[in-house]
Image: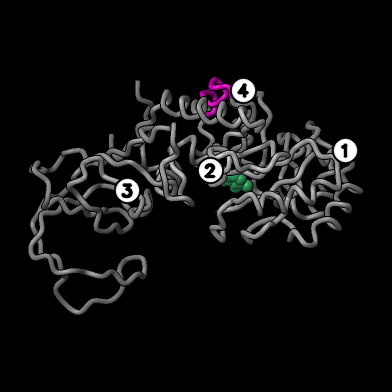
Amino acid sequence: MYPVIKINLQSIKKNAQFLNELCASKGVDVAAVTKVVCANPDIAKELLNAGIPMLADSRMQNIVKLRNAGIEAPLMLLRIPMLTEIAQLVDYVDYCLISENQTLKEIVEKKGKKETKFIFMVDVGDLREGVWYENAQEEIDKALDIAGEMLVGLGTNLGCFGGVIPSPENNQRLLDIANGYKFDIISTGNTAALPLIENNTLPSGVNHFRLGESIMLGTDATGSRKVPGTSQDTFTLECEVIECDKKPSIPIGKTGRDAFGGSPQFEDKGWRRRVILGIGGQDIDPTGLFPLNECMTVLHASSDHTIVDVTNCEQKYKVGDVIRFRLSYSALLRGMTSQYVFKEFMV
Ligand SMILES: *Cc1c(COP(=O)(O)O)cnc(C)c1O
């Protein structure tokens, strides 16, 4: 059945092993981030088989899913919690990223099955979650009053909203704050921070990274690169051709907006051979589809149709043929989330 995402567990495991060892060699523990695969338990178990000591996810539902799948490894909740999640949080979460003392207080006051530990998030420039670094000390002091020894670390996140690249300087900003305390965990890295480990410029004191994209895809979107030592053959999307035709490259008639309110631009390349695939924007980010066969280019996707230009391909595609893609992070995220995309493990 199509469309299908074929999952290469062995390749994911190798990426996890490689990155876990690379980070360990610099004294950095890794939490493997499962949100891009919706916390698929088979993938999660393979990450643990690879030697990864901790799993992390941004969604409460995914944390519950991992626990209910029998996973006993420590679980970290990455997204700072909603007040309405606290009742579940205290029963399921081992490590919780936090940035609001009001939320912290409500969690601490709510007793659950878990002795949840906290990592206070500090914003050193990317402008997503965390208390602004210049005001951090006051907030952390308050957090210590509330949580006491359950506040075990400081963290930061970079490369996500502002696209700020992790550097020795912005990592040092967090360490300077941490110096005033005795915390066990200093968690700065996501995939975008791996260059600091690769070229030995991570300031000493950082001892925890949360890695998703580099393990799952072998890529680093912020640095727009492949991560050296990893492979990119972890996921393959296969789609079925539902129409093959020759059409002009420019629409005929007065044009408005497309299905999603966008204003597509067209370049006149004459008549083109194109195929339509039975997959669309509901299932995939069309800008993140990379054909294995490089002769083709993805033109556009509406909700349920994706149009691919195959004029430059030697193969003459016909209805029923299958076309394969590698995926960007956003395309994988949407594909794994879509209930209309089948998932299959490669053997
Ligand atoms: C998603 C997420 C990560 C993982 O980032 P990658 O770029 O996929 O490695 C790390 N930390 C937090 C807080 C996240 O939300």
Is label 1 in contact with label 4 (beta carbons under 8 Å)?
Answer: no
Q: Which of the two labelled residues, at mark 3 and mark 2, occupies the earlier sequence position?
A: 2
Instruction: Name the residue carrying label 4.
Output: 70
In the displayed structure, does residue 134 sit left or right of residue 286?
A: right
Q: Which of the two labelled residues, at mark 3 and mark 1, occupies the earlier sequence position?
A: 1
**Real-space Cα separation, disc 4 to disc 2, in angstroms:** 34 Å
Q: Quadrant of the C terminus?
A: top left
Q: Residues within 10 Å of mark 2 (few under 14, many from 20)?
A: some
Q: Which of the four quarters of the rendered structure image does ligand 1 lie in?
A: top right
Amino acid on which the number 3 mark rests in the picture: Leu
Q: Residues within 10 Å of mark 1 (few under 14, many from 20)?
A: few
Vertical placement of residue 338 versus 256, above or below: above
Vertical placement of residue 326 versus 268, above or below: above
Say which of marks 4 and 2 sits in front: 2
Amino acid on which the number 4 mark rests in the picture: Gly
Instruction: Name the residue carrying label 1.
Output: 149
Residue 170, image x and y in percent?
Answer: 66, 54
Instruction: Name the residue carrying label 2.
Output: 195
Q: Is residue 46 magenta?
A: yes
Q: Determine the main secondary structure of the stretch shown in magenta.
A: helix
Say which of marks 3 and 2 sits in front: 2
**SS at mark 3 in the image:** strand
> Does residue 171 show up?
yes
**Real-space Cα separation, disc 3 to disc 1, in angstroms:** 46 Å
Amino acid on which the number 1 mark rests in the picture: Glu
Visual colour scheme:
one colour
Q: Quadrant of residue 90?
A: top right
Is label 3 in contact with label 1 (beta carbons under 8 Å)?
Answer: no
